[in-house]
Image (cartoon, grey):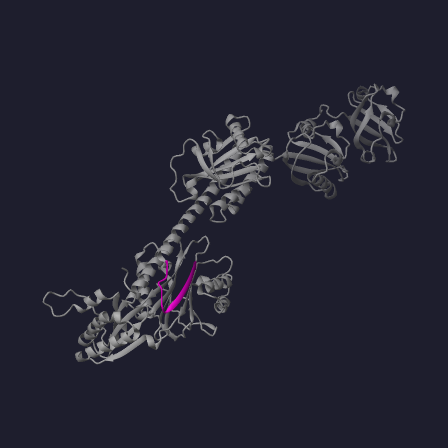
Amino acid sequence: MVHGSAAAIVDTRGVVRGWSEGARELTGYPADEVVGRPARDLLTEAPTADAVADLVGTVVLRRRDGSSVALLLSACAVLGEDGEPSSYMITAEAPGGSEPTLAGQAFQQASLAMSVFDARQHYLRLNDTACRIMGVPQEALLGQHFPESVEDAPAHRGWLAHLRQVVDTGRPVRYESFTGAPALNREHAWTTDMWPLRDGDGEVHAVAIASFDSTEQYWARQRLLLLNEAAATIGTTLDVVRTAEELIELLVPRYADFASVDLLEWVLGADEPHTLLEGDIALRRVAHGSAHEGTPEAAVHLGAADVYHASSPPARAVREGRAAVSQAGEPDFMRWVAERNSRAPAGRSYRKGVHSLLAVPLRARGTTLGVAVAVRIAHPDDFGDDDAVLGEELASRAAVCIDNARRFARERTTALALQNSLLPRGLPGQAVVEVAHRYLPCGSMAGVGGDWFDVIPLSGSRVALVVGDVVGHGIPSSATMGRLCTAVRTLADVDLPPDELLTHLDDLVTHLASDDRDAEAAELGATCLYAVYDPVSRRLTTAAAGHPPPAVVLPDGTASLVPLSAGPPLGVGGLPFEATEIELPEGAVVALYTDGLIEDRDRDVDHATEELCRALTARTDTLDDLCDTVLKAVLPEEPGDDVALLLARTRALGADRVATWDVEPDPAHVAATRQAAIEQLTAWGLEEASFVTELVVSELVTNAIRYGEPPIQLRLIRDRTLICEVSDGSSTSPHLRRAHAFDEGGRGLLLVAQLTQRWGSRQTGSGKTIWAEQSLEPPDL
């Protein structure tokens, strides 16, 4: 035996046959007291069956002085002449002793937690780092089954399963886990390598393990994952409050136990950004959340204003434009907690244990919008520099989304205000049609569209019904809509037929596109439907430029689309428009609408059109009720485009309200025509209008005879106004001129303009018509 080595020879019957000096020094037994005795007498308890079978294991040996010592024993068979074991050489190693070899020292002193388990998951060896993590010396673990040394937890069950996997497969395993350890006060991330140890026959008889504390790398990955998640979850809507809530949902509970977002007042209003932020900072709470239901830690209610003291971390973050980290024990931090407790004492118990605060300014495009505050209470770690960097990155992304939402809300409000100012506020009262309308701006991120409608009174008691849609969304679309709406009214005053009006409107859109060098012509494209209803003839004349056809509901309850040639959209240029004329019975309902009512990515247009026609036949008390019924029946819950709907119920002017005379082209017949008009007024009970009507008829008929061409016709229409129309075969339009002092003529139209409410002329298929209207209501005194 080599002096100093603890070794013994035991025969196959378990009797000690040899004893080294090292064994004497380790146990205190001299050789003469041990040799010849059963080896079992030296043990406090019998070794496990696994240790006997594997010829390696930890046993507890009784020293000569009565004390015990745990030893790691390894046995090596000594073969006899027959090749069978005749005895065993047993060597002992005291756990925790100095390692005699360089490899052993490397194992014992490694910064990694290293250990060795037998094939049945019993501890064989642990190095110093592993013992420090477990919180017990090696002697307390050697020979113990792994599940008995740790609590029953998913992470430990996974560890055991991987140990068994290495033994069963003989292949190494890399295992990552996030769990605590007996001697650690918080959870750590571990990267563990497990590999098999083989004997001379290649059989796996043990498993070696090396565990690396990868907590820093784990949290670095978590921060990257959090940033990646922020890109996908923050800013899903163009809503300021919802964006702030999305930031809170990301922070709590993974990053903080409580978080809040407060914004400067101007962000939520229409004011300009504040350029100077000094002293106490006034903010408004828009979102907060915590790990506790109901957010009991909050001292400020949602929507309420709060003033942060100049020395508080949130105020410093806003003022300095960078993250402010504050920990328990610092004066500003303690002052902030005390102020919160005094303001909302009901949440004091939930704030107990608060130990770290991170305040990050919300800055976008060089402008401070507010501040995000994160607080840790149950989370064991204080906020550090890495957390501040992460917080600034998250806040930056959220701030850009909040600023985008603010800009969108402001632009949407501006576009709506512009559109509302351009749309008719109150449609003019009409004797020939009863109208009702609805305009629904969509809530999509694209912004307010360019849908519009109008009802325009025309001469001869006729009325124009208009609906249109400008391509695009936002302020440019609303501005273009305003141009077209004004242009249609101007062209309607000229009294052009629907197809000619759309031709002129098409030229206007083309010119607008060519003048706008920064926009494509298609971006100024638009669709339009223009219809004129004549209550005398009861005919509806319609022309469309790329617009859906109107629907008509007859008094018998049937509904159908007007067979109409849609024509090209406005702005295409060079293609003709066609007008369609139909006769309507009194009481028919004409429905004009924009494509947002029937078109959508998820809907079939034909099916939606059928739903529209079916909804228009619903029995309702008023047209307003019918508008609501149609929208409810046809529109989806969240329309993807603006919707304009205009309903008009027609009325007719019967023969008793219209009088017509053919006039001979001879000045001698002017007096007879004038007299016939006066008699008709008497029959209508409009004697008070006789004087002015006599002058108007005389002047207009005389001008037609003198300057026009036959045939000449006079027509009186009794509506809300008294309308006098004189038609002739000449296309030359009349105009006012100033007569000189000695001129015999030239004052007729000027006199007509002064005596009537309004006058004008329109082109007809065979010439022109000059008309003048008189009010039948008594003048206000």
Q: Position of residue 210 (x, y in %)?
A: 67, 34
Residue at (67, 32) in percent of width and height = 113
Left or right: where does residue 139 sit relative to residue 560? right
Residue at (31, 75) in percent of width and height = 658
**Residue sitting nearer the eye, 518 or 598:** 598
Q: Position of residue 354 (x, y in %)?
A: 57, 31
Residue 429 on the magenta segment: yes
**Residue sitting nearer the eye, 655 or 216:** 655
> Is residue 214 depicted above or below 730 in this figure?
above
In magenta, the rendered stretch is 425-439
> Is residue 548 depicted above or below 642 in this figure?
below
Instruction: Let me know if residue 239 appears in the view.
Output: yes
Left or right: where does residue 506 sit relative to residue 406? left
Considering the image in quadrants, where does the C terminus appear?
A: bottom left
Considering the image in quadrants, where does the N terminus appear?
A: top right
Residue at (53, 27) in percent of width and height = 334
Q: Position of residue 628 (x, y in %)?
A: 47, 62
> Is residue 72 depicted above or below 551 in this figure?
above
Q: Position of residue 670 (x, y in %)?
A: 19, 77
- Using the rendered view, name the quadrant where residue 657 is placed: bottom left
Left or right: where does residue 511 sit relative to residue 90? left
> Is residue 344 depicted above or below 553 in this figure?
above
Instruction: Let me know if residue 320 appears in the view.
Output: no
